[in-house]
Structures are given as structure tokens and as C-alpha cells.
Amino acid sequence: MAAFDTVIRNGTVATASDTFKADVAIRQGRIAAIGEAITDADEIVDASGLLVLPGGIDSHVHISQPSGPGIVMADDFESATRAAAFGGNTFVMPYCLQEKGQPLRAALKDYHALAEQACYVDHSFHLIIADPSDSVLGQELPALVADGYSSLKIFMTYQDLALSDYEILGVLQVARETGALVQIHAENYDAIRFLTDRLERAGKIAPYYHGKSRPIAVEREATHRAISLAELIDVPIVIVHVSNREAMEEIRRAQTRGLKIHGETCPQYLVLTEEDMQGLNMEGAKYVCSPPPRDKASQGACWEGLEQGVFSLFSSDHCPFRYDDEAGKLTPKGRTSFRWVPNGIPGVETRLPILFSEGV
């Protein structure tokens, strides 16, 4: 009987602290040894020229999520989790989105049905609270947290998703009472609407102006407000997909004051800039996401946030739409403004490679 079930040989092993040539031996699904010339195994996998990494956890992905009338995501669970596996991820956490008027239990049942069709990696769900009614906050949400759905997401922007400060405080109060962790998409919805209307009236409708409709101040203000609301309730929160220094500094200041504020950034803010949204016709739509990519200085700030621990999460915010499809980035005739371009880009397959190639 062989000593190990599987040995991965001749690869370059990357751990939390070092990168080195080694063999990795596996027994009963667990790493049992790391060393040289390990050959006593039932199965030998040759990893020559390849990196051998721990399985990644991408805690922020959007899969088969409702995205508005006529808009369809490019990934279902089969294709998204296959991409995740190719990108070195063994666990993903997509979002179960509650639509207005929809019971949370019903949304969760429907979403589980989608995931059960085909998945190549392990998964769990966050809950998106879009309709924090009395019954949701008083009954459904506490029951679901007790069942193990202990992470929530709320939005400060997007039509049909943005919550008022009063509604946010209600969700945060339930999180405090139940021990749930709330993630917040921090952008000021009214400011974005105001700027978008002005840009369109001036004829500035190309994808590039998506970034101009969501300047840093819009994200910084919402980040500060989200932190202040969490402070009122005394509850931990995560500010997701931070794109710039000013928002990062709001998080850093809160952490310095002892508040339980966590931050997350994403690959697009490390390697893309607003210039990527330039291009002929709607080419720049490929890079439209929210918050948008910023400038080189903002890239440096996001790297700094990772290096210094201001950001404790590095997730992809995987949210793909087909570029050449009217159900995706190719907006229908008569809808040529950036306003109608779905916000989101893929990333679950490239998250770990980008972090390694650009950061290590």
C-alpha cells in the first residue's frame, strides 16, 4: 500500500511566506508532506513548470443573478465554477439576491436550485437584502442567520437595490442581534443620478463617462456614512470593492479608532485604470464596473491597503456580461448612454494569477 494517495511533483510551491520547488503529498484529502523526491503514491501528478498553490476562496462573486429587465449574466454556476477551478479557487461565495417584494426564503430556494444543476467547486451564499420589510427583519432574516446564512450584503446605490440610511440601520441592528456580518456597497446613489443626468445633457454618454458619473468623492462619502451608521449600532461591517486612497483612508481611520471595519479590494483596481474605458464606439464598456477603475495613484493606494492590512479581503467581484449581446454590454438601440451598460467584469479565473504575477 502506497504511503500517499497523490503526490504533486516538480512544481513550484507557493505558501503564505515562501516560493520554492517541492513535491506535495496528499493523504485522505489533506496535505501530508512537502519535500523532495516523494514518489510513494497511488497517483503521481507532474506539475513541471506550474505553480502549486493553496486552494483559493473567492468570497465575492456574482453568478446567475437577476440584473434588470432584458439583462442576463454571462455565467451560470457550471461555467462560473469551472472558471473558478481553472483560476485556482476551490470555494466561491456568490450572492442570493432578494428582489423587491420577494420573501428571502423564496429567493434562497430558487438560487439553491440553480446551483444544484452543476458546480465544480464548493460554494456558500451571501444574502442580498433589497427589501428590508418588517417581516424580513423581524422574522425571515433572523431565522436564516440561525440556519447558517450569516453574511449579508446591502447597497447604497442602484435602482431597486439602494437602501435609505433608515433601512441600513434596520439591517445593521438585526446583524448586531444575530451575529451576522454585513457587507456594504458604498456609493452615493443620488449623487450618481445627479452627475449622470448632467453628463447626458452635455452629450457625454460614452462608457468613459461612467467613471465621471462615479468620482472618488461619491465613494468616499458613502464609505464614511456607512462607517458612521455601523458605529451608531456598534456592529462590524465590510466595505467591499474599495477603489481609491480616500475611501481606504476612511477605513484606516475607523480601524485606528478601534471600530470593527473591514475592507476589500479587487484585481480591477490593481491593474486597470479609467483610460481602459476609452475606445471606439462602446469598446470601453468591457471595463465598466462599479466603483469604476481610477488612476495610477489609486492603484498604488490599493496595493498599499493590501500590504498594510487595511484590506483583509481580496476578491474578484466576478460579474460577467457578454460584450456582443444586447442582453449584456451591447446596449439596445436607443440606449447608447453609459447609463444602460451593465456594471461588472469577470475575474474569478484571473484573481489569484493577477495577485501572484503583479503582487509577488
Image (cartoon, rainbow, N blue to C red):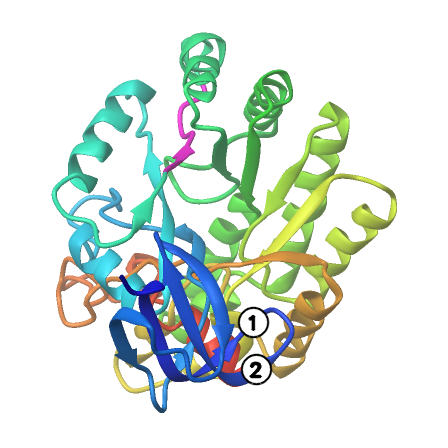
Q: Position of residue 46 (x, y in %)?
A: 29, 83
Closer to the camera in the image, 244 or 150: 150
Relative to 175, residue 112 above or below = below
Q: Which residue was labeled with disc 1?
A: 15
Relative to 147, residue 227 above or below = below
Residue ID at (35%, 64%) = 3
Based on the displayed image, in which of its 4 quarters is residue 360 positioned? bottom right
Residue ID at (37%, 57%) = 27
- Asked if the stretch drawn in magenta spans residue 129, the answer is yes
Q: Of helix, strand and loop, which mostly describes the magenta segment? A: loop
Residue ID at (12%, 42%) = 117
Closer to the camera in the image, 39 or 201: 39
Say left or right for 49 vs 217: left
Closer to the camera in the image, 173 or 144: 144
Q: Read off the magenta span.
A: 125-132
Say left or right for 249 vs 193: right
Looking at the rendered structure, the kind of residue marked 2 is Thr
Relative to 302, residue 137 above or below = above
Q: Which residue was labeled with disc 2?
A: 19
Say left or right for 110 vs 11: left
Relative to 314, residue 158 above or below = above
Q: Is residue 113 visible?
A: yes
Q: Position of residue 341 (x, y in %)?
A: 30, 61
- Mark 2 and mark 1 in contact? Answer it, CB < 8 Å: yes
Secondary element under disc 1, as helix, strand or loop, is loop
Q: Position of residue 13 (x, y in %)?
A: 49, 78
Looking at the rendered structure, the kind of residue marked 1 is Thr
Based on the displayed image, in which of its 4 quarters is residue 87 positioned? bottom left
Label 1 Cα crowd, 10 Å radius (few <14 / some 14-19 / many 20+): few
Say left or right for 115 vs 300: left
